[in-house]
Image (tube, helix red, strand yellow):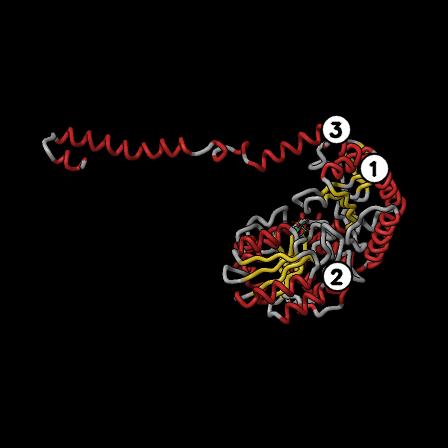
């Protein structure tokens, strides 16, 4: 219609002006109306629901009279004791399972590699190349797990996300234990595979899911943690292996918390159950816990490792691990193997702590006495109040609340180290049992 008017009886300048104004109108109007129709919460961060949630939690903590329990700055090395703002605490909040974070040999290995290779690997190993500690560490980890090869990433979280996403796709299916770490679930989500979770360690429920869904997909993966980091219980590996064989699936076991803590020499759940290493297709571990460094790794067949080398985005497009951290992790691994007393000491202390907690009437859930001892208190307010009361009494144990664990299963997690003294453990449990009623009263008073 507009075109017709332009064609009939107008000068070329008039036509040009009109066209220009129409263009401006058609271009501007939708933009203006679109802008008007977009609610404010889609255009700024401080109205995002997750931001509001954090603010509410902070306000609750303030009203409860507790400090923010997260992001506390430790003054020095975190081991069985930690110092915060000049005050010494008995520390159950760190993963230094074998007490190697302050080991002189580990420090020396780190310093030597720093002197030889500098601070950074500078870019992806694909392009910027490797340094000897990378492959030395990976060969040692492959030997530890009894696999053909191994590959290390800069982050444990990225290891799970990128590995799963590189291997599985939209025609595949992933079955994962409900208690699996966020990084495993994120990996499954990024893979865009169909996903089914089963209740923690419930292999009967998993079997039923496999019977119903397995045949609808191409490849299938069963995912579990070896030692569950939130619960301190061990996965039922023999049954998972039987199921993976029966239903033609791959099996991935995240050993982040099991290495150094489970198995006679700390080699994890494979050693604990004496399984054939090749019955698990993907062994995953982190370097941030027992090996007191940073990064993660995958151990498995040579083909699996080569796929990751060339196709896993978190490996290919991310910097290589700093060589000094690869060297210090390797040293920590060798210390673990050369000094099996560290593993037995940790296991003995963990069992003792679990026993004491049970005797004191504390709820330790399904924990089996391997480094992670949860004290389940139920509601988040009690968990936060108890953590603060313990801190006031010189003990660090952090609360884990929803969504870290299911609603109503809030807890304090105590990480045991081979370096903890018996006295520290006894005091931690006695103090927790003594302060729990007070924490409940504080939480009730606040809620009520
Ligand atoms: C079971 C499990 N897997 C993976 C990770 C991620 O490892 P990282 O913290 O080394 O990135 C964690 C972290 O705590 C974990 O508990």
**Which circle marks residue 267 in the picture?**
2
Please state which of the two labelled residues, at mark 2 or mark 3, is closer to the viewer: 3
Task: Give yes or no for contact between labels 3 and 1 (Cβ–Cβ under 8 Å).
Answer: no
When the figure is inspected, residue 230 is found, relative to residue 250, above or below; the finding is above
Please name the residue shown 72% across and 39% down the image. 380
Q: Few, some or many C-alpha atoms within 10 Å of disc 2 (few <14, some 14-19, many ≥20)? A: many
Q: Position of residue 431 (x, y in %)?
A: 86, 39
**Which circle marks residue 170 in the picture?**
none
Q: Nearer the viewer, residue 326 or 28?
A: 28
Outermost residue on the left side: it is: 9
In whole angstroms, how far apart are the C-alphas of marks 2 and 1?
Answer: 39 Å
Q: Position of residue 290 (x, y in %)?
A: 74, 52
Task: Give yes or no for contact between labels 2 and 1 (Cβ–Cβ under 8 Å).
Answer: no
Element type at mark 3:
loop
Outermost residue on the bottom side: it is: 246
Q: How many marks?
A: 3
Sequence order check, earlier mark of 2 and 1: 2
Q: Is residue 230 left or right of residue 32?
A: right
Q: Which residue is mark 1?
A: 437
Please state which of the two labelled residues, at mark 2 or mark 1, is closer to the viewer: 1
In whole angstroms, how far apart are the C-alphas of marks 3 and 1?
Answer: 17 Å
Element type at mark 1:
helix
Q: Position of residue 187 (x, y in %)?
A: 58, 54
Disc 2, ligand 1: is the CB inside 8 Å?
no
Element type at mark 2:
loop
Q: Few, some or many C-alpha atoms within 10 Å of disc 1 (few <14, some 14-19, many ≥20)? A: few
Please name the residue shown 79% across and 39% down the image. 396
Disc 1, ligand 1: is the CB inside 8 Å?
no
Q: Position of residue 52 (x, y in %)?
A: 59, 33
Q: Quadrant location of the N terminus?
A: top left
Q: Which residue is mark 3?
A: 65
Sequence order check, earlier mark of 3 and 1: 3
């Amino acid at each position: 219609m507009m075109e017709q008017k332009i064609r009939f009886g107008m000068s070329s300048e008039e036509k040009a002006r009109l066209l220009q104004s129409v263009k401006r109108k058609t271009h501007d109007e939708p933009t203006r109306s679109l802008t008007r129709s977009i609610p404010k919460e889609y255009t700024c961060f401080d109205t995002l629901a997750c931001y509001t949630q954090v603010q509410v939690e902070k306000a609750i903590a303030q009203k409860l009279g507790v400090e923010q329990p997260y992001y506390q700055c430790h003054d020095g090395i975190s081991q069985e004791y930690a110092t915060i703002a000049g005050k010494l605490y008995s520390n159950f909040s760190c993963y230094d399972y074998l007490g190697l974070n302050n080991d002189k040999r580990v420090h020396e290995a780190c310093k030597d590699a720093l002197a030889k290779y500098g601070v950074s690997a500078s870019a992806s190993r694909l392009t910027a190349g490797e340094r000897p500690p990378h492959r030395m560490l990976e060969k040692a980890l492959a030997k530890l797990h009894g696999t053909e090869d191994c590959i290390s990433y800069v982050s444990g979280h990225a290891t799970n996300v990128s590995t799963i996403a590189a291997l599985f796709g939209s025609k595949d299916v992933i079955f994962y234990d409900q208690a699996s770490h966020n990084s495993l679930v994120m990996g499954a989500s990024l893979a865009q595979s169909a996903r089914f979770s089963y209740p923690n360690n419930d292999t009967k429920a998993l079997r039923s899911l496999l019977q119903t869904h397995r045949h609808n997909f191409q490849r299938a993966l069963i995912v579990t943690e070896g030692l569950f980091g939130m619960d301190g219980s061990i996965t039922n590996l023999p049954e998972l292996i039987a199921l993976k064989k029966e239903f033609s699936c791959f099996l991935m076991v995240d050993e982040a918390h099991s290495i150094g803590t489970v198995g006679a020499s700390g080699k994890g759940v494979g050693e604990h159950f004496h399984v054939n290493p090749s019955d698990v297709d993907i062994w995953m571990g982190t370097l941030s816990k027992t090996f007191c460094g940073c990064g993660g790794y995958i151990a498995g067949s040579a083909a699996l490792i080569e796929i990751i080398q060339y196709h896993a985005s978190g490996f290919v497009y991310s910097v290589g691990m700093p060589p000094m951290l690869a060297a210090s992790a390797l040293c920590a691994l060798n210390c673990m193997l050369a000094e099996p007393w560290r593993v037995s000491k940790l296991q003995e202390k963990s069992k003792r702590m679990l026993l004491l907690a049970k005797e004191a009437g504390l709820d330790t859930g399904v924990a089996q006495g391997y480094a992670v001892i949860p004290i389940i208190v139920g509601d988040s307010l009690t968990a936060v109040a108890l953590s603060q009361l313990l801190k006031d009494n010189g003990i660090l144990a952090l609360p884990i609340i929803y969504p870290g664990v299911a609603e109503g299963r809030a807890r304090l997690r105590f990480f045991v180290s081979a370096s903890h003294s018996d006295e520290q453990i006894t005091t931690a449990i006695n103090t927790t049992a003594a302060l729990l009623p007070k924490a409940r009263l504080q939480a009730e008073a606040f809620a009520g």
